[in-house]
Image (tube, rainbow, N blue to C red):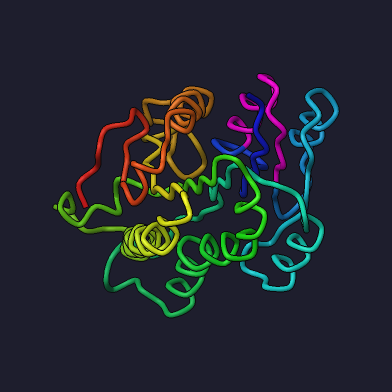
Amino acid sequence: MPQTIIVTGASRGIGLEMCRVMAMRGDGVIATARTTTPALAELALVHGVEVMELEVTDAASIAAMARRLEGRAIDVLINNAGVSSVAKTLGELTMEDLQRVFSINASAPMLVAAALLPNLRLGARKVVMNISSQLASIANNKGGSTLPYRASKAALNQLTVCMANELRADGFCCVCVHPGWVKTDMGGPNAPLTPPESAGYLVRLLDGLTPAKSGAFLNYDGATMPW
């Protein structure tokens, strides 16, 4: 059955490819990004994707998006927008970098979800998929490095569990997902997965999500990740 799905950070990489996969199979896709790119414009023209500008760190932009979508049912929110950190070691940390990375990777997904909560309540599936990272795992952290990124994704995981617990009685499924190591600007050229491959895995995972999975940290193949 076709769904209405909104994806943040959809201008390139995994977000763009998820929009492509879901639109090609007939889902109603709302792709959000800071600016409309040629790739997004092509998706809109060829596959009917609705493109909407959104700056996830700007409260006014989030509010404007919510006003545009007022009264529309949304089945799935995919919080994909994210950034890496400049600092890799303790000695390189700056307040500016920490605040920027936490704002985009941890705070923004929660604020977008909160703004779209009325829409998600109207939807049939009530799914929030937050794109996290294996680097968020505290149990698997044996080498440190990329401190703001790791910590921001761990914060996202904690916030996702909080959201799952708060909305469980309403039938929501809120999960955090590692998309794999992917050949993107962030993942680099040595990653084993391409964006289309990762997107394919993530869409299959999305299709199988139920409220029973709410609060889980999942690998792209559906396996449970260690916290």
Query: Which one is nearer the viewer's eye here, 170 or 223?
Result: 170
Residue located 49% across and 77% down the image: 96
Q: Is residue 73 above or below residue 199?
A: below
Residue located farthest toward the front when viewing the structure as drawn: 169
Say left or right for 136 vs 115: left
Which span of residues is magenta-colored? Answer: 16-31
Tell me residue 2's x, y (percent).
Answer: 66, 27
Relative side of 142 to 198, left or right = left
Q: Nearer the viewer, residue 136 or 158?
A: 158
Nearest the camera: 191 or 213?
A: 213
- Across and down, in percent, residue 8 comes to 62, 49
Residue 212 lies left or right of residue 40; in this view the side is left
Please give the name of the residue rendered at 32% of the width and 40% of the height, measured from the top-left corner.
Answer: 218
Check if residue 17 falls in the magenta segment. yes
Q: 145 or 63: which is nearer to us?
A: 63
Residue that appears at 37% across and 34% down: 180
Q: For residue 33: magenta?
A: no
Q: Position of residue 67 (x, y in %)?
A: 79, 63
Residue, x 17% and y 49% (percent of image)?
140
98 versus 20 height, above or below: below
Relative to 23, is 225 above or below?
Answer: below
Residue 196 point in image, percent of width and height: 53, 24
Tell whether 119 sits left or right of 64: left
